[in-house]
């Protein structure tokens, strides 16, 4: 028993010292214990997420989904962007473009008209509203919108020039199809949110 008492007296100081060193080490690493940090930010952060990083912008996500022909998902991403930044001209135009690709012409026209009202020189909105009106057979107004888009763009975008040519041809009854046949139009993506109408006979 005497030997055991002597052993405990010799070992106890080393045990206490090592315990104190462990606590000090935990404090020096910002409060990290055996199970990592316990601060509120870390505890409430999903596994694998970095709270210091900003989320990806909804418009960027939407543009990528549009490029991948995921129009319904793109629409949801654009709606998230609207919640983040409000219904800016960019968001309105993007929402209109997504609805246009989904064949929802009424919604697309309404959104794109709001975008044009917000900024009468915003080229994508002017062009895409013209596309909607071409799809609805309203060639005269579509021609005016393409002319405005072409002027605001300084004639730099070939797709807008082609849209304008098609609108002029339709309003002037130029020969793009047989008289008994109406041209069908295909929407082709150009950039993030501008579309070109191609005649397909």
Image: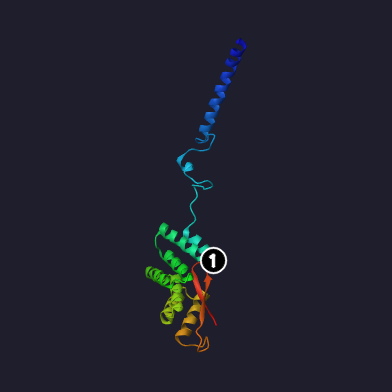
Which of the 4 quarters of the picture holds residue 78?
A: bottom left
Left or right placement of residue 112 versus residue 179 in this view: left
Residue lying at the far bottom in this picture: please name it. Answer: 179
Badge 1 local density, few (<14 within 10 Å), some, or many (20+)?
some
Q: Is residue 18 above or below residue 61?
A: above
Q: Residue 200 at what x, y percent from top left?
A: 54, 80
Residue situated in front as seen by the camera: 102 or 93: 102
The residue at the point 49 percent across, 68 percent down is: 193
Q: Is residue 156 visible?
A: no
The residue at the point 51 percent across, 78 percent down is: 185
Q: Is residue 98 above or below residue 33?
A: below
Q: Residue 136 at what x, y percent from top left?
A: 44, 78
State how many labels appear.
1
Q: Residue 34 at what x, y percent from top left?
A: 54, 34
SS of the residue under disc 1: helix
Residue lying at the far right in this picture: please name it. Answer: 3
The residue at the point 45 percent across, 41 percent down is: 40
Q: Quadrant of the N terminus?
A: top right
Q: Which residue is under mark 1?
A: 67
The residue at the point 44 percent across, 76 percent down is: 130
Q: Is residue 114 visible?
A: yes
């Amino acid at each position: 028993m005497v030997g055991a008492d002597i052993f405990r007296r010799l070992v106890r100081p080393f045990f206490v010292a090592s315990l104190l060193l462990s606590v000090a080490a935990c404090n020096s690493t910002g409060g990290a214990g055996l199970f990592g940090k316990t601060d509120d930010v870390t505890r409430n952060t999903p596994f694998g997420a970095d709270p210091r990083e900003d989320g990806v912008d909804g418009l960027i996500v939407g543009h990528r989904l549009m490029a991948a022909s995921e129009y319904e998902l793109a629409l949801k991403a654009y709606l998230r962007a609207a919640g983040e930044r409000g219904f800016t001209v960019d968001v309105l135009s993007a929402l209109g473009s997504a609805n246009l690709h989904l064949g929802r012409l009424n919604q697309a026209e309404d959104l794109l008209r709001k975008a044009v009202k917000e900024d009468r020189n915003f080229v994508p909105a002017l062009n895409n509203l013209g596309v909607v009106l071409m799809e609805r057979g309203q060639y005269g107004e579509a021609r005016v919108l393409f002319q405005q888009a072409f002027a605001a763009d300084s004639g730099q975008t070939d797709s807008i020039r082609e849209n304008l040519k098609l609108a002029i041809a339709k309003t002037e009854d130029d020969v793009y199809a047989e008289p008994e046949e109406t041209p069908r139009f295909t929407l082709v993506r150009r950039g993030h949110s501008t579309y070109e109408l191609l005649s397909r006979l």
